[in-house]
Structures are given as C-alpha cells and as structure tokens.
Image (cartoon, rainbow, N blue to C red):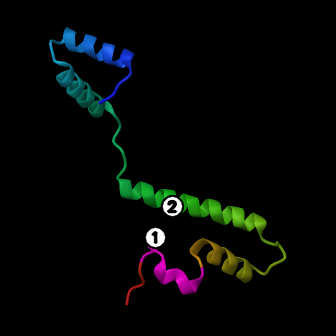
Amino acid sequence: MKMPELLTATVDAWAEAHQLSRSDAICKLVEFGLRIAPPTPASGSTVVSDATRLEELAVHEIEGLLDPALPEDERERRIRRLTEGPPEFSHERIDLPKPRT
C-alpha cells in the first residue's frame, strides 16, 4: 500500500509506541477506524436512490425545455420518451426491469 511520507511516519511512530510492526499497526488502525465509522447504507439502496434522483433532475430539466403551451398528456409522453427511451427499444435496456410474461 502506498501512503504519503508524513502518514507513513505517523503510522511508524504509533506502531513503535504500541510495539507493533507497521503491518500490524495499519491493521489495528483500520479496525479502530471501521469500529467508530458510521454504518454505510446497503449499496443497492444507494444505487436506486441515485437513479431516482437523477431521473427527477432529468424530468425537471426537460420540463423547463418543453413548450408550456403543449397539452399535459403530450408533455408527459415526451418526458417519458426522453427518460425511458422509445418503446420499440425498451426491451433492449439493461437498466430497466424486464416485463413479466
């Protein structure tokens, strides 16, 4: 593992004070850090929430670009087509759930 010189010197000083090798000191310090670090959310929920947030941002931007005089159903159709893609290609998308048959 590559570390900056100052960090290496600090780890070495800590290891010497605790009579540990550098490797053991790094393991102990990582354990300490992980013990006090806040738990991270499950990665799946982060991906879903990020995707949802990105879609919301895209819809907001698209709404700003569309002609306000368009009927509401046409606005929704255009937004859906831009965020989900044309229906004829939806079966090719790997980021959307497959339809149940």
**What amino acid does circle 2 point to?**
Ala
50 lies above or below 34: below
Disc 1 to disc 2, C-alpha distance? 10 Å
Give the mark toward the camera: 1 or 2.
1
Q: Residues within 10 Å of mark 2 (few under 14, many from 20)?
A: few
**Horizontal and vertical percent for residue 97?**
42, 76
Residue in the foreground of this view, choosing between 94 and 74: 94
**Residue 21, located in which quarter of the rendered image?**
top left
Query: Is 14 situated left or right of 38 in this image?
Result: left
Q: Residue at x 44, y 73 (%)?
A: 94
**Horizontal and vertical percent for residue 54?**
57, 59
Tell me which numbered mark, 1 or 2, is placed earlier along the sequence. Answer: 2
55 lies above or below 40: below
Instruction: Name the residue carrying label 1.
Output: 95
**What amino acid does circle 1 point to?**
Asp
13 lies above or below 93: above
Q: Is residue 93 magenta?
A: yes
Instruction: Name the residue carrying label 2.
Output: 51
In the rendered image, the quadrant that contains the C terminus is bottom left
Dot 1: element: loop
Q: Residue at x 37, y 49 (%)?
A: 41
Residue in the foreground of this view, choosing between 37 and 3: 3
The residues colored magenta run: 86-97
Q: Residue at x 21, y 25 (%)?
A: 28
**Horizontal and vertical percent for residue 77?**
67, 81
